[in-house]
Image (spheres, grey):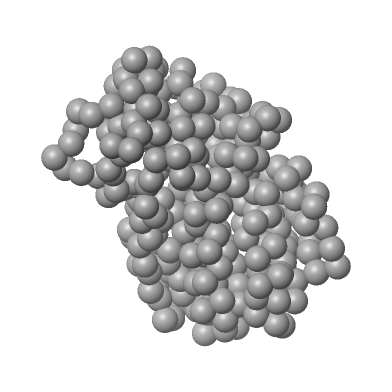
């Protein structure tokens, strides 16, 4: 669900586990990321344009991945400039142009200086960063007067009546594996509007988008590819074995699929 760079943020006892698991050199990595982008980009772009992204705007896209959001800001919103930031920018080669600045850097690098922005967007990035609260402060500090910060991260809306299906066990194993390896934590995502308010931003609001999880859809393919790549880590949690993962993958491709999958909370606020 995260950008290719966002999933590679956390260093743990095993090293840069995210790089090993979701490395950009993998043949299906760009396709995996773009499958999710097909679902989330229209919603994201609609919100960014509604918040004022347009001609004259200087925008920062954090965890730019393959550049799908940056491209939409340029082509659909007509913004003046997009700074596309990621630790790995190999997926941004096709984005080069006079209104694009590609920056290969780590968001947590204290020496990073990018100037001021009228819009800062980060999707599926902060949930992977242990210092996410400090990063929110930093991003808010990069806003020009009147500029807006928009943060989108994942949130689960689980079925409380289902704790033992192959789908539920595999999804829970995934979150546990991500948490114990690269530090992913979605528990504070609903608090993001409060964090923006604490930064002194005004007109703070948030919304929840839960895309339909339909068999053989781009989103189902994203989860299938993610779980296939995470098989060893999923089984190491002790929550699932190979047979359970196989059953969950088959379910994602089945017409019997009937789940409210993970959603995205988008929160935003404006600098005075």
Q: Is residue 184 something that shows in the picture?
A: no
On the image, the x and y values in percent for residue 36 come to 52, 48
Which residue, as the protein is rendered here, is positioned at the far front? Answer: 255
In this image, 9 relative to 188: left or right?
right
On the image, the x and y values in percent for residue 193 come to 37, 67
Q: Residue at coordinates 49% horizontally, 38% vertically from top-left?
A: 221
Q: Residue at coordinates 40% horizontally, 76% vertically from top-left?
A: 204
Q: Is residue 228 something that shows in the picture?
A: yes
In this image, 56 relative to 251: left or right?
right
Judge whether 266 appears above or below 197 on screen: above
On the image, the x and y values in percent for residue 156 come to 32, 47
Judge whether 212 appears above or below 81 on screen: above
Which residue, as the protein is rendered here, is positioned at the far right? Answer: 98
Which residue, as the protein is rendered here, is positioned at the far left? Answer: 161
Q: Quadrant of residue 256?
A: top left
Q: Residue at coordinates 56% horizontally, 27% vertically from top-left?
A: 21
In this image, 202 relative to 19: left or right?
left
Judge whether 252 appears above or below 94 on screen: above
On the image, the x and y values in percent for residue 250 come to 37, 27
* Residue placed most toward the observer, 175 or 170: 170
Q: How many marks?
A: 0
């Amino acid at each position: 669900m995260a950008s290719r760079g966002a999933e590679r943020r956390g260093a743990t006892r095993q090293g840069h586990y995210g790089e090993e698991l979701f490395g950009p050199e993998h043949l299906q990595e760009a396709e995996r990321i773009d499958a999710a982008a097909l679902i989330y980009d229209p919603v994201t772009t609609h919100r960014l344009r509604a918040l004022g992204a347009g001609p004259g705007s200087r925008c920062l896209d954090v965890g730019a991945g393959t550049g799908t959001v940056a491209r939409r800001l340029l082509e659909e919103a007509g913004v003046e400039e997009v700074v596309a930031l990621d630790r790995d920018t190999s997926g941004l080669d096709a984005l080069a142009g006079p209104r694009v600045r590609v920056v290969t850097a780590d968001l947590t690098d204290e020496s990073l200086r990018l100037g001021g922005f009228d819009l800062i967007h980060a999707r599926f990035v902060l949930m992977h960063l242990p210092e996410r609260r400090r990063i929110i402060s930093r991003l808010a500090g990069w806003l020009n007067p009147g500029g807006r910060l928009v943060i989108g991260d994942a949130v689960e809306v689980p079925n409380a009546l289902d704790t033992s299906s192959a789908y539920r066990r595999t999804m829970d194993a995934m979150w546990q594996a991500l948490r114990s390896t690269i530090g992913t934590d979605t528990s504070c995502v609903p608090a993001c509007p409060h964090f923006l308010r604490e930064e002194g931003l005004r007109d703070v609001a948030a919304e929840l988008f839960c895309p339909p999880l339909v068999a053989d859809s781009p989103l189902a393919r994203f989860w299938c590819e993610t779980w296939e790549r995470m098989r060893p880590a999923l089984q190491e949690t002790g929550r699932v074995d190979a047979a359970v993962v196989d059953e969950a993958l088959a379910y994602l491709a089945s017409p019997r699929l009937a789940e409210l999958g993970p959603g995205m909370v988008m929160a935003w606020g404006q600098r005075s």
